[in-house]
Structure formats: C-alpha cells, structure tokens
Image (tube, rainbow, N blue to C red):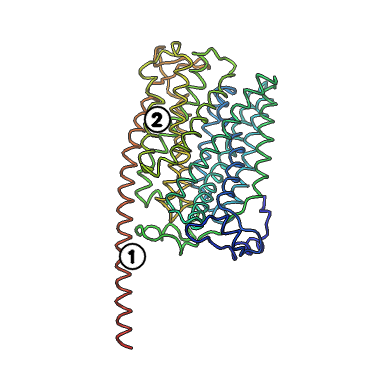
Amino acid sequence: MPSSRSDDENESMTGSYALAPAGESEDEFADDEPMMTTPAVSAQRNFLLASTLFSLNHGCVTACLNLATARLGNVGAEQSAVLYISYAASALLGSTSVVKNVGAKNSLILGMGIYCIYVGCFALASLLRTHPMIAEAVALVGAAVGGLAGGILWTAQGSFFARSAEIHSQCSGITLPDATSDFGSYFAAIYLIGEVAMNMLSSVLIQVFRFSWIAVFIVYFTIAAIAANGMVLIYEYPPVDSDDSDDSFGGSQDAITTKPSKATAAWRLLREDPKMICMLPFNFAFGFAASFRASFVSGEVVRIALHDEKSKYVGILSSITAIVAAAMSLLFGKMSHAVGKGTILVVGALSFFMVAFPFVLFPQLENWGLSAILLTYTFQGIGRSTFEGTLKAEFADFFAYEKEGAYANIVLQNGISNALGFFLSVNLPCSTPGDYCVQYSDGKLHNVLAFEILVMITAVIAVLGYWRAASIYAKEKATGRERAAEEAEVAFAYADVEVGEE
C-alpha cells in the first residue's frame, strides 16, 4: 500500500523541518516558529500513534499465535515453527533491503498488510477442521507468509523507532540514550497494552457473547486490517545518509553500510561486529522462554492443572504476561536513567530463567494451582518488558551506524530461537511416563526437562554476553573520543600553520 503523501509533499515537509533549540519542547517551538509549509510534526505524537496502530495489528497476530497450539494442536506448534523459520529467513533474505529502499513507513504498511493474511488463515483453518490435510496446508502457508511479514515489520519498526528517537532528541534537547530509553518504554507499554486487549478479546467473545472460534478469528482479521490502513496517517522522517551516521566505532561500519550489502546487512553485522554475537544469547533466551510458555505452559500445564480442555483460560492468562510487561516497561524506562539499561537487561534474563526453573523444582503438574501458574506468566512478562523496550533501546545505542541491520538481527535471532523452541516442544521424546516425561494432548510422551534446562542455561549466558558487549561498546566510545580529539588537534595545528604563513 503506497504512502498517502506524494514525494513532493514529503520533500516539502522534510526540506523545511526545523529542530527546536535545546531545552524547548517540540510543540512550543512549532507554535512560536512555524517554519514549514505543512504543520510541524511532533516526533513523540507521531511515534505514539504509529505504536498504537502497530500494537493493534500485532496484538491480533500474537493472540492467534497464543491460541495456535491450544486450538490447532500439533498443527499449531508446527505452524508456529514455520512462522518463525520464515521470520528468521526474511532477515537474511532482504527485509533490511526492503526497509532501506521503500522507507520505514511503507514497510510498516506492507508488513502489517501481509500479517492480515496470517490472521485470516486461522479462520480458514478452523473452518476446514473437518478436512485436516487442507486445514494444515492453509495454516502452514499462512505461517510462511506471516513470517515474511514479521521480518519486514519488525525491521521497519526498529528503523522508525531509532529515527524518531533521534528527531525527538534533537528537538527536545535530551540525550539520545535518554530518548531511546523513553521511546523504548513508550512503545513497549503501548504494544503490550494492545496485546492485552487482543488476548482478552477472545475470552470475552467466547465466554460472554458465545462467538464461535471462526467468528473470533474473523474479528481479529478485521481489526488487523483497519490498523494496517491507519498507518497511512503516519509521517516518516527523512533518513540519515550513511555519510552522516556515527563513525566513531571501529572500521566495520563502512563495509556494512555500502549499497550492495543492503540485503545482507543483518548477516554482515552479525559476522563483523562482535557486540552482535554477544547479544545473541539474550534474544535466544527470550525466544526459548516464549516458546516454552506458549507450547508447554499454555498448551499443557493449563490444561492439566486447571482442567481447561477448551482453552478458555489461555487468552486471559496470556494477557497477564502482557499486562505485567506493559507496566514494567514504563517502570524500567524511568529506572534506566538511574541504574542504566544493563541492570534492567540482567533482571530480564533472570526472569526468563525463572519461567522454566519452577518446573524443575516442582514437576508434578497436577499439583500446580492458579497462583503458581500466574507467577510463571508474571516472570515471562517481566522478561518480555526488557526485550520489547530496554533491549531495543540498547540496540539503538550499540548499533547506531546500522539501524536496519541491527533490528533485522533481532528478527533473525528471535525467529531462529522461537522456531527451534516450538520444534523442540513437540520433538523431544521420552519412553517412560514420569515427572519430566509428560503426556501431551496429542497422546505422545515429551521430555520437558531438556527444554527447561535449555531455557535456564541460555538465560545465564545472556547475562555474560551482555556484559561483554557493553565492555566492547565502552572501549569503542573511548576510541572514538580519542580519535576525534586527535583529529581536532591536527586541524588546530594546521590552522596555526596557515595563519603563520599569512
């Protein structure tokens, strides 16, 4: 879907866009000094509107994903694995290039529009449940298409987020790290509130209004489509040329940001910047914990412990995770100014550890009550708030020279970890029923202990990886300052020579 503004209009807006002096708000400056042929756009208001529309569209997707295993059984787990494989592949096969070539706004519209196909496939697969082979094909095709959409969408969101934070920093006079912290917390809270609403919607429609599951998925499709169309109202700020980007951090940036490498920027960044390898375990910790919670906790623990054969509690319980994540995102956004983003990320990694650890200590699922299950969803919510907000803000700081490639790496790593997690959730067999060898709803025995240990080990490595990445970044900043000082000294000396010659 093309942008609602012409190129000439966008050029007019960007050409006359003026930044507010330090210490003045964007709105005050816009009111006092109107310098644009069209009204000045508040970076913060623009970002909040985009985040709201994004949250509605993606909330529908997440609600369907949470219901996939519960409503479609093993097909749902396979569908989720295909979704994340496609999601990861899109990061390697050109989502970065799409965003760089058509812009963040148009990429957001494109990704949200294609996501509607994924949501619509749930309604179609539910309608065709009497024809299981056809229903499975529809579900898997929809997942493949949805994964491609997600890769484009999240890469575009990261680019739009980072650019909006830059504009807001310049307009308001606050530092860029503070702007990324604030915008990261705003986005995470809005995004997760939208997810809460969409998760709870299924339970309300089923329990109160007696909708069929087909009708529920049709409602989700409608909301997702309306939100995608609403993105035409968003203003996109002009991109920063590679020549203007921060060049203070080593020598690999030039190779990564050249035009021929747009399509492979994510892979090149992963290969050439050691910070990205160090941040990989955090993304994997989130992916493994999320797939563990969705496939095992929502799909099996809730069914066994709460006797919920019809999945009527899944939507409400999943909303607990999103509610906690939304609240903690705002809290962590304020806390990060005082304690730093690193402390918040360590808390997040330990929360992912605690998603699986209680099941190692207390493996008898029949003895689990509602309060214990709620605690698991709460830990996932705390961890997720750091992934959706703080981590992405830290990526904007760590990889300022290649924003699209950095956020495509989040797509890539999250996609691989979730795909692997959903695959392992139904493909770790065991032979003798026991506390750690659980019979799933498909009648097969599954080794849950191996999956639990994987989640915990990855979370611990995530902490170590972040500390190493932060250390490298600190050295890069110091090196950049030293180089800038040397260049300034040379320039000053050269000026003295010219004056002496005159």
Seen from the viewer's position, the closer of residues 25 and 45 is 25
Q: Position of residue 24 (x, y in %)?
A: 51, 57
Q: Amino acid at mark 2?
A: Ser
Residue that badge 2 annotates? 351
User: Within 10 angstroms of label 2, few (less than 14), some, or many (20 or more) residues?
Assistant: many
Is residue 203 shown left or right of residue 490? right
Seen from the viewer's position, the closer of residues 138 and 438 is 438
Tag shown at residue 484: 1
**Image quarter of residue 342:** top left
Q: Position of residue 445 (x, y in %)?
A: 45, 16
Mark 2 / mark 1, whichever is N-terminal: 2
Q: Position of residue 36 (x, y in %)?
A: 63, 63
Q: Position of residue 351 (x, y in %)?
A: 39, 30
Q: Please report contact status of discs 2 and 1: CB closer than 8 Å, yes or no.
A: no
Seen from the viewer's position, the closer of residues 478 and 147 is 478
The residue positioned 35% from the left and 17% from the top of the image is 361
Give the alpha-carbon distance from disc 2 to disc 1, as whole Å: 40 Å
SS class, disc 1: helix
**Exactly how many numbered labels are in the figure?**
2
SS class, disc 2: helix
